[in-house]
Image: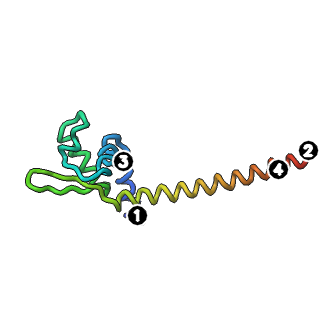
Amino acid sequence: MENHEHRLDLAFTALADPTRRAIVARLCRGDATVGELAQPFQIGLPTLLKHIHVLQRGGLIASAKTGRVRTCSLTPAGLRSTDDWLRAHIASWDSRLDRLETHLSRIARDRSQDD
């Protein structure tokens, strides 16, 4: 459980940055080289490589080097674990809000019957 929490911490830390979220969004369309990933950003290659490293450490992407070209791809399991965590918490809040709505409806109905 603790290891899973640590992985989630790394994944959410990686997703906290807008540049890294943009990289993930780009990789949703398919694999890309580091050069292709760098094109829309006004940052140097060393900075982009740091972002890629954070995403890799978060388990969200993988990269492979062939010759001088590094290609990045999404790691579905990393994205799935963050999605699972979010969905569990959303379901919990949806359930709480449904119970609140039922309770408020009951109060309104009781008040209208008293009038």
Dot 1 falls on a residue whose secondary structure is helix
How crowded pointer 4 is (Cα within 10 Å; few <14, some 14-19, many 20+) is rated as: few
The residue to which callout 1 is attached is 2
As shown in the figure, which amino acid type bears the numbered disc 4? Arg
The mark found on residue 15 in the picture is 3
The residue to which callout 4 is attached is 109
At which x and y percent is residue 10? 35, 53
At which x and y percent is residue 75? 30, 59
The residue to which callout 2 is attached is 115
Q: CB under 8 Å between callouts 3 and 2?
A: no
As shown in the figure, which amino acid type bears the numbered disc 2? Asp
Residue lying furthest right: 115
Q: What's the CA distance linking mark 4 and mark 2?
A: 10 Å
Going from N to C along the chain, the mark reached first, 1 or 2, is 1
At which x and y percent is residue 46? 18, 41
As shown in the figure, which amino acid type bears the numbered disc 3? Leu
